Image (cartoon, rainbow, N blue to C red):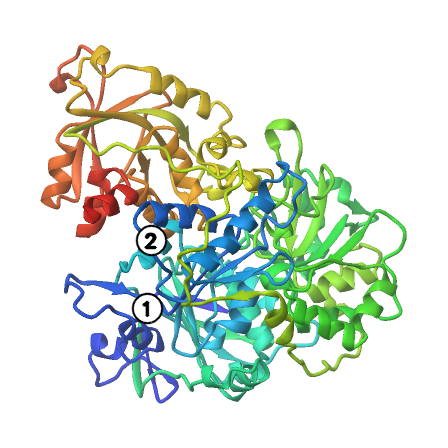
């Protein structure tokens, strides 16, 4: 696999470095641009951006309460498109008393009142439900989860923070600069024992950060050699490359997928036009992919299992995991096959084939498997696979995303877990370094996890075993959903009351931006990348996602525990005592990170800062468009700068910021503020706001998205 920075044409399905067609015109012939253009809102401003309206939306129970509460405060009357509320993140109700189930009751009442779809806990993980019931070739789905990826089924999925879904609910648009498109040209065929996660991890290793905000477009003869499960298993991990979205060519296998799921009308053949242009390209030869492991703490930190086993000390000693090496072999404590990446039908069937006539034993190694939906669980029961797995000692659990973010099957302290899941970030999967608790996750394909389980917990690539496998055909039992899920899409019942538990609270009032801005730096983080899990931890905080004030207490708790206390100190300070006019000066908290926002789309990474008085963020660059958009939607100016040599406690003063935003300026001058000094005596810092469209500027001026909508209602 190799990434190429240069552009390339695709002419009649074959790569070409030259063509008679203009690059800009040929870019319009990509599948990505054809779909994007078809979703541009009629009459939208011609300002060089795309203003998109989606066909459907989907959220889970960490995000949908906040989204609906925000939209409700902004004038929501009915969902304008099919909107599914799934319950796959806060399914466990042991933390926080009745909180999680109260959120579920709220979700069902909102689906009835506003005309939505409600998927009860343990019926399906968010993305599997969307694949089975909502995808369609040429469609676009917006989800409040970063792994909203359905490109293998011909659907462009984009994961965003909640406020972007609020905009769609209120008939506004999703606004992006015209994206670059990266071609992924697929050839070859997977070898036995190599699965979709191996390809995905290798793709992350090769492209992470290089394809930021691009659309990945998969074409080539190798696609025909992949099943639809293998395709979607690769596709869902494109999020970890930092791309915006993905799209694949479709064929008779995709057509069969839609037929099996009772939605033949969802299929349409997709391929690029006769001559299409791509800004960059990746050559992917499936036959060259080996079983892979993504080492802690990122999916791109990848190595072949062969290399890892050859020199385990080289890879594990820097992590302090030398004790996992036993007689030259790596012993792991736990295996997990779960969620939108791992819990697929073919993954589980092949896992059973590898484990046939084996047992995981009676030691400390455990294996937990979560089918991604109840229809998949029913089918593995019908094929006898469920029995084989139970006989091998595996534990089969209901559809749940917990193992992906630390709300289920957290390993022991210093435990090494191998997981067919989407992420292995620091401070995730239960780790609380500040409290002396650590967990280490390596991402691996289900096949190699099964091979490791068959070998008593000693790390083993599936290509090392001799096993037979022929996947039984998949049968989809739609009646499971028909009998249990509420489907009132586009059929609102306004008379239905919303059901509120005591933890569900409204957003606190947020002030409009004044003429000038003064911020106090309450956290300065020098790490190369700061993930959303560090900005607001996952796991035990999930229960409080419907209570902005309680959740905000967890902000930066695992990375900078003193942050919340500092914001409280800032809130007590008086602008007039600092020598500035309180009627003209907004005063708040701020953080600096080199590259914040890698990972989850959840809006709370930004909203918690805002609830604590956050007024701006400073960065060298933002890791994702998602996080930067969240900052804007919550009224925090997303400054970037070339350098930030200042420490926690420093104050930055930006005079005339309101006028700068009103005038369309993309830059401003900040001053390292010292009370009593003249501006001419203060250090200056060049600040950039980047490209902001008219709506984004107004949101910042008014203080947040809710204020923006309230103003327009009036």
Name the spot of residue 152 as percent of width and height, x first: 49, 74
Crowding around mark 2 (Cα neighbors within 10 Å: few <14, some 14 to 19, many 20+) is some
Answer yes or no: is residue 339 visible: yes
Residue at mark 2: 76
Residue at point 23% right, 76% down?
23
Asked if residue 66 is positioned above or below residue 83 in the image, the reply reads: above
Badge 1 element: loop
Which numbered disc, 1 or 2, marks the residue that appears first in the sequence? Answer: 1
Of 28 and 78, nearer the camera is 78
Question: Is 365 on the left or on the right of 525, as rendered?
Answer: right
Residue 366 spot, x, y in % from top left: 80, 52
Q: Secondary structure at mark 2?
A: loop
Disc number lying in front (1 or 2)? 2
Judged left or right of residue 236, residue 443 is right
| Residue under pointer 1 | 6
Q: Is residue 16 above or below residue 233?
A: below
Q: Foreground residue, 41 or 330?
A: 41
């Amino acid at each position: 696999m190799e990434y190429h920075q240069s552009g390339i044409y695709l002419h009649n399905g074959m790569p070409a470095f030259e063509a008679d067609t203009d690059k800009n015109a040929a870019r319009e012939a990509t599948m990505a641009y054809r779909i994007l253009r078809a979703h541009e809102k009629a009459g939208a401003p011609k300002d060089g951006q795309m203003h998109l309206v989606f066909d459907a939306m989907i959220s889970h129970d960490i995000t949908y309460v906040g989204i609906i509460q925000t939209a409700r405060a902004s004038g929501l009357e009915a969902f304008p498109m099919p909107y599914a509320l799934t319950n796959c993140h806060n399914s466990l109700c042991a933390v926080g008393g009745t909180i999680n189930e109260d959120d579920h009751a709220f979700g069902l009442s909102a689906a009835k009142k506003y005309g939505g779809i409600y998927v009860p806990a343990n019926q399906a993980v968010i993305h599997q439900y969307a694949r089975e019931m909502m995808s369609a070739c040429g469609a676009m789905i917006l989800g409040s989860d970063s792994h909203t990826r359905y490109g293998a089924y011909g659907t462009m999925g984009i994961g965003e923070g909640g406020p972007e879904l609020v905009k769609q609910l209120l008939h506004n648009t999703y606004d992006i600069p015209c994206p670059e498109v990266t071609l992924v040209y697929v050839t070859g065929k997977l070898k036995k024992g190599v699965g979709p996660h191996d390809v995905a991890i290798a793709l992350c290793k090769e492209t992470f950060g290089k394809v930021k905000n691009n659309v990945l477009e998969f074409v080539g003869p190798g696609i025909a050699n992949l099943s639809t499960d293998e395709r979607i298993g690769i596709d869902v991990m494109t999020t970890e490359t930092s791309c915006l979205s993905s799209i694949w060519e479709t064929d008779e296998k995709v057509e069969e997928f839609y037929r099996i799921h009772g939605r033949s009308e969802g299929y349409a053949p997709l391929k690029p036009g006769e001559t299409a242009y791509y800004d960059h390209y990746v050559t992917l030869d499936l036959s060259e992919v080996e079983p892979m492991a993504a080492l802690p703490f990122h999916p791109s930190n990848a190595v072949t299992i062969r290399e890892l086993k050859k020199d385990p000390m080289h890879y594990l000693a820097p992590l302090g995991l030398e004790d996992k090496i036993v007689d030259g072999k790596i012993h792991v404590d736990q295996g997990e096959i779960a969620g939108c990446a791992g819990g697929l039908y073919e993954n589980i069937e092949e896992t059973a084939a590898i484990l046939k006539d084996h047992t995981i034993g009676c030691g400390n190694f455990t294996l937990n498997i979560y089918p991604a939906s109840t229809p998949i669980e029913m089918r593995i029961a019908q094929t006898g696979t469920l029995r084989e797995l139970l006989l091998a000692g595996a534990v089969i659990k209901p559809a749940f995303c917990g193992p992906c973010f630390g709300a289920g099957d957290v390993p022991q302290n210093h435990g090494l877990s191998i997981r067919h899941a989407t992420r292995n970030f620091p401070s995730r999967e239960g780790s609380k370094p500040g409290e002396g608790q650590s967990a280490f996750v390596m991402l691996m394909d289900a096949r190699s996890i099964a091979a490791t389980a068959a070998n008593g917990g000693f790390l083993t690539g599936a290509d090392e075993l001799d096993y037979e496998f022929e996947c039984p055909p998949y049968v989809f039992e739609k009646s499971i959903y028909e009998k249990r899920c509420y489907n009132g899409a586009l059929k609102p019942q306004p008379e239905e009351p919303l059901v509120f538990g005591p933890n569900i609270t409204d957003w606190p009032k947020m002030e409009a931006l004044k003429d000038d801005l003064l911020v106090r730096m309450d956290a300065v983080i020098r790490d190369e990348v700061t993930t959303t899990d560090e900005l607001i931890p996952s796991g035990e905080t999930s229960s409080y996602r419907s209570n902005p004030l309680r959740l905000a207490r967890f902000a930066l708790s695992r990375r900078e525990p003193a942050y919340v206390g500092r914001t409280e100190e800032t809130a007590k300070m008086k602008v007039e005592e600092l020598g500035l006019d309180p009627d003209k000066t907004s005063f708040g908290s701020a953080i600096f990170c080199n590259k914040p926002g890698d990972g989850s789309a959840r809006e709370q990474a930004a909203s918690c800062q805002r609830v604590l008085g956050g007024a701006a963020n400073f960065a060298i660059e933002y890791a994702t468009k998602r996080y930067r958009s969240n900052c804007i939607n919550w009224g925090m100016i997303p400054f970037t700068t070339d350098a930030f040599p200042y420490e926690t406690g420093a104050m930055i003063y930006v005079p005339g910021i309101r006028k700068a935003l009103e005038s369309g300026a993309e830059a401003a001058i900040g001053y390292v503020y010292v009370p009593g000094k003249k501006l001419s005596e203060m250090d200056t810092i060049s600040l950039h706001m980047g490209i902001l469209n008219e709506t984004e500027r107004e949101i910042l001026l008014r203080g947040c998205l809710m204020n923006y909508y309230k103003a327009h209602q009036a």
